[in-house]
Image (spheres, helix red, strand yellow):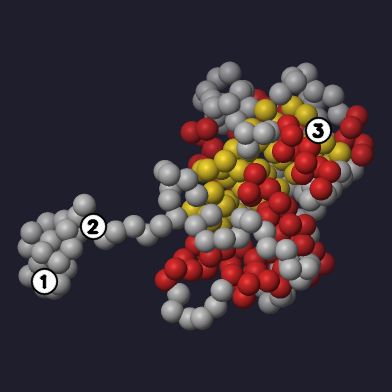
Amino acid sequence: MNKQTTLRDLYLEHKKGKVSSKWESYFTIYERHLEGLRLKRLNMVEIGVQNGGSLDLWSQYFPFAQICGIDVDHRVSKLVYETNRISVLVGAASSKEVISKVQANFPNGLDIVIDDGSHRSKDTVYNFVNYFHLLKPGGLFIVEDMHAGYWHEFGGGINEPLSCIGFFKNLIDLINIEHSRDTFNLDDLFGKYFPQGVKPVCLKTQSIAAITAYNSVFIIEKASDRLAPKLGSVVIVGSEAIVNDKVSPEVVRAP
Ligand SMILES: C[S@@+](CC[C@H](N)C(=O)[O-])C[C@H]1O[C@@H](n2cnc3c(N)ncnc32)[C@H](O)[C@@H]1O
């Protein structure tokens, strides 16, 4: 593989074979987050296969990855791939059967999950809670087409109580909850999304390192040693503090 071939180039050169469509801006976003992972032996899931072209292109972009596509449309079972690095599961992504098969196929966990499924807010929230906890530390959960999160016909909307947009905004509070001086807890943030009372394991403090929101693409990174979710201790360096001597090495020393 030519290491310089970007995802955009792979897409633009893909004139024959299975169809895939992506918004143009996604290529820059993907390159920014995924370029450094290209030669790793990744375990990857893409929710939403349709014509199957994206699985083909991901397998070229990640030449050592095992890639599993999931689609509720049974016609995806007809898709045939030249590489055994690609597999396809038929069923709803958040069904128990499909989740169990993914866990069985990837007992060591996942590195990347892309949700390009229905884009209905409820599915988006449930796919996140059902797959984020299967990620390895540092793994990425990527949601495409978040613009649908603003659309009422997809269960979304800025003020829609159960929209996935609101859910992901709450993840910002989850990341920073240790600093809140208001009295609220995780149930206040997420309880309404799970009225049956089940508390998803990933929605606990210090499980998420970062959430990056682009136009229509959200990327949520699982906490790891490399990117810990803790604020840590304050690091003060230098020896002169002529404006505010409370900020000086005498007060708090760098470790
Ligand atoms: C936008 S298409 C996927 C396109 C593909 N990822 C690509 O880039 O070419 C969305 C697909 O998600 C599938 N889908 C919808 N709801 C789903 C669900 N709950 N679980 C799994 N797949 C679903 C649809 O059947 C459809 O084929």
**In the drawing, does residue 215 fall left or right of residue 209?**
right
Q: CA distance from mark 1 to mark 2?
A: 15 Å
- Most extreme residue toward the bottom is 182
Q: Position of residue 14 (x, y in %)?
A: 71, 28
Circle 3 sits on which residue? 88
The one of 234 and 211 positioned closer to us in this rendering:
234
Within 8 Å: ligand 1 and the Cβ of disc 1? no
Amino acid type for the residue under numbered disc 3: Val
Q: Is residue 9 visible?
A: no
Amino acid type for the residue under numbered disc 1: Asp
Q: Residue at x 72, y 38 (%)?
A: 103
Q: Residue at x 71, y 59 (%)?
A: 125
Q: CA distance from mark 1 to mark 3?
A: 62 Å
**Mark closer to the observer (2, 3):** 2
Residue 245 numbered tag: 1
Residue 231 in which image quadrant = bottom left
The one of 247 and 114 positioned closer to us in this rendering:
247
Q: Position of residue 20 (x, y in %)?
A: 76, 37
Q: Residues within 10 Å of mark 3 (few under 14, many from 20)?
A: many
Question: SS of the residue at dot 3?
Answer: strand
Circle 2 sits on which residue? 235
